[in-house]
Image (cartoon, rainbow, N blue to C red):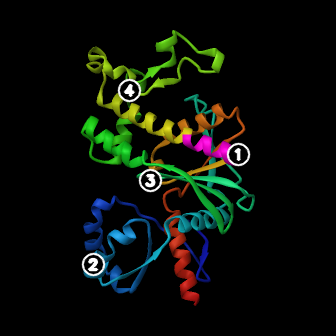
Amino acid sequence: MNNVKICNRIGTLHFIRFPTSEMNNFLELSKKKGMATSVSTVCATGGGAFKFEEMFKNELNLKLCKCDELDSLIRGLLFTVASNNNECYFWSQCTEDEQCSTQEYTFQYNKYPFIVVNIGSGVSVLAVYGPNNYKRISGTSIGGGTFLGLCSLLTGCNTFDEAIELAANGDNVKVDKLVRDIYGGSYSRFGLPGELVASSFGHMNSKEKRAQVSREDLARATLVTITNNIASIARMCALNERIDRVCFVGNFLRVNPISMKLLSHAMDYWSNGSQKAIFLNHEGYFGAIGCLLSFDERFKE
């Protein structure tokens, strides 16, 4: 992020990401690059701020100043939207491959309320009513960690990027049972189109169909299953709270346009266009930005 003002300085924010399974390698890198000698305290958030606290202390002699995960998320999101004019976007014509594109969205961050769906290993759904006024209204344990775990079991993949690449080349229709597989077409009385998934992995009770699917098909079906579940929860939360803007964030959406398009279509279709799915360019880093802002406050004090 360019031209960001923090600690009364204007500069560029740089971001890196890695799975927590690589924490030991990150600590070794920190030693080699001398990162640990320039500071004594690091602001941290999320479960890792607790899980790896002793490791940072013993290996790098660094103290972790722990910041609340959801406070940091909301604070970082609001700051980023206010600082970066091109942060937000939505998907246009997401069901048409040739015409589908992203469109810039002007997010009036001071216009409340809105929903935040944070998709990490699991999912948290927050309703934001003001800068310091939000509540966690729902969540699910079926998130990005579920996708990678099931994909690893079903396809033998080892990383999230590998799982997404497999899914990009698969066809979930070979795995999932659709409405047309049950009705021979659409169930028009209740507005259920024939191509809608009626039963995730519904074809996999057939030995013959199991023999015809590929690793790619299984990965795609897994991604569609997880994403559709998240979309359903997000839509119902927005409906219950009477909020029409829903921001989807979290590292699950990195390099994952398939899920973004599915979320966009689901929100638009089932709400008859009244609810919009909004995405952000720095979707996985708002907690880190919120931590940095907390450090700024402590520095001023």
Q: Which mark is residue 31?
A: 2
- Work out how far the residue at label 2 is from the one at label 4, CA to CA, in angstroms: 47 Å
Q: Residues within 10 Å of mark 1 (few under 14, many from 20)?
A: some
Give the label, 2 or 4, closer to the camera.
4
Three-letter amino acid code at the position of disc 3: Gly
Residue 184 position, x and y percent, is 51, 9
Helix or strand or loop: what does disc 4 sit on? loop
Left or right: 144 as drawn, with respect to 297:
left
Label drawn at residue 161: none
Residue drawn at 46 percent across, 65 percent down: 15
Amino acid type at circle 4 is Phe
Q: Which residues are magenta?
A: 233-242
> For the residues marked 1 and 4, what is the alpha-carbon distance in whole angstroms?
31 Å
Split into 4 quadrants, where in the image is the N terminus?
bottom right
Query: What number is the disc on residue 120?
Result: 3
Asked if the magenta segment contains residue 10, the reply would be no
SS assignment at label 2? helix
Q: Nearer the viewer, residue 293 or 46?
A: 46
Mark 2: give few (<14), some (14-19) or many (20+) Cα within 10 Å. some
Label 1 belongs to which residue? 244
Residue 56 is situated, as x and y percent measured from the top left of the image, at 31, 77
Q: Residue at x 46, y 14 (%)?
A: 181
Sequence-first disc among 2 and 4: 2
How far apart are the two marked residues, 2 and 3, measured between alpha carbons? 28 Å
Which residue is label 4 attached to?
201
